[in-house]
Image (cartoon, grey):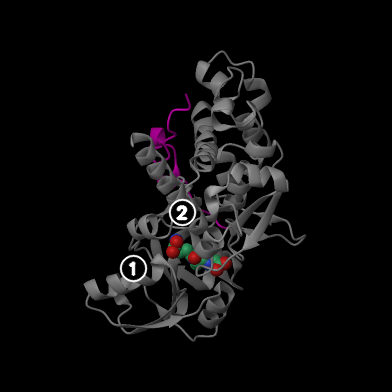
Amino acid sequence: MKKTTFALAAAALIAAGASANAQTPARTSTLDAVKGRGVLTCGVNTALPGFSSPNSQGVWQGLDVDMCKAIAAAVFGDATKTKYVPTTSQQRFVALQSGEIDVLTRNATQTLLRDTTLGLHMAGVNFYDGQGFIVKRSMNVTSAKQLDGATICVQPGTTTELNLADYFRSNKMKFTPVVIERLEENIAAYQAGRCDVYTTDASGLASVRSNLQVPADHVILPERVSKEPLGPMVRKGDDQWFAIVKWTLTAMIEAEEYGVTQANVDEMLKSTNPGIQRMLGVTPGFGKALGLDEKWAYNVIKQVGNYADSYERNVGPKTPIGLERGVNDLWTKGGLMYALPLR
Ligand SMILES: N[C@@H](CCC(=O)N[C@@H](CS)C(=O)NCC(=O)O)C(=O)O
């Protein structure tokens, strides 16, 4: 009798598992699928210089592209084994849910509803941001509070669209939205005067401005009207893959904390600091725990760099994007970047 009950319960569990499998393609190991394919597929922006855009030779570059390369370096020991799938704000989550991409490395904000209803997990924050507004200098506007009655270009399927409505409502102002899916068309509409204002994450504004014909003719207004913690996302239901993405980003930040850079990582293999020894695989066990080679983090730092290397190269003050570290600096320097202990 007991045996029958057990068998029935087991059968029910298997059936439940099977139906969950049918709904969630992520149930097969993403790591195995990526390794089998020999390439990591990342969902990126269509063209957001500094974050992800192809250069004149068609080579993808940017902070979010580096996130993708870092995962490839951790998995394959080769940061070039990547494929980039450009996605609009509206397509991006479906691309991840459907398995078209292995990871979304594309300025996606973590929110409660996205976390609970999309079947996706945010694996960390690689850029702390906030929403802003860009206007033509000739409008002589110095504050978002002066935008009552403005026509505003915005991309659908974004937190931007929602925050925009909140901000204007709470400041008792009116606006006319012009909702356009593709970034380039938003920018064209803004430049052609179809809208007075373009709104998105401030990092996106800096990127967009660097691409305008005369950047100095446009002003990013000082208000930040939301919190936009941006970072890589994975499908729910594959804890190992989630851990790989999470700890790859963590390793980049941890390396900056330890002063281990792309330039000195080989020298650092001789370090007597136990934390550095664990991170670089000199003390083994940490790669194995992730299902990766012990040199996983070494490969990330050697081939892509630590978080600061990537930040300065792609979006820092010396680049056309020109973003100070600000809240994206290490916690030891007054910022929010804090690596969970790699031990
Ligand atoms: N962080 C916001 C906005 C993300 C977003 O899609 N921003 C636009 C404006 S910067 C974008 O990335 N466009 C680039 C593209 O469509 O290629 C969100 O997750 O909803």
Residue at x 33%, y 78% (from the top left corner):
147
Q: Specify whether residue 339 is painted magenta.
A: yes
Residue 111, quarter of the rendered image: bottom left
Q: Is residue 95 above or below residue 234?
A: below
Residue at which label 1 appears: 163
Q: Which residues are magenta?
A: 320-343
Residue 177 got which mark? none
The N terminus appears in which quarter of the rendering?
top left
Q: Earlier in the sequence, mark 1 or mark 2?
A: 2
Q: Specify whether residue 260 is painted magenta.
A: no
Residue at which label 2 appears: 20
| Location of residue 316 in the rendering, given as x and y in whole percent from the top left corner | 55, 49
Q: Nearer the viewer, mark 1 or mark 2?
A: 2
| Location of residue 11 in the rendering, given as x and y in whole percent from the top left corner | 44, 46
Amino acid at circle 2: Ala
Mark 2: is the Cβ under 8 angstroms from ligand 1? no
Residue 83 in the figure: left or right of residue 27:
right
| Location of residue 192 in the rendering, given as x and y in whole percent from the top left corner | 54, 85
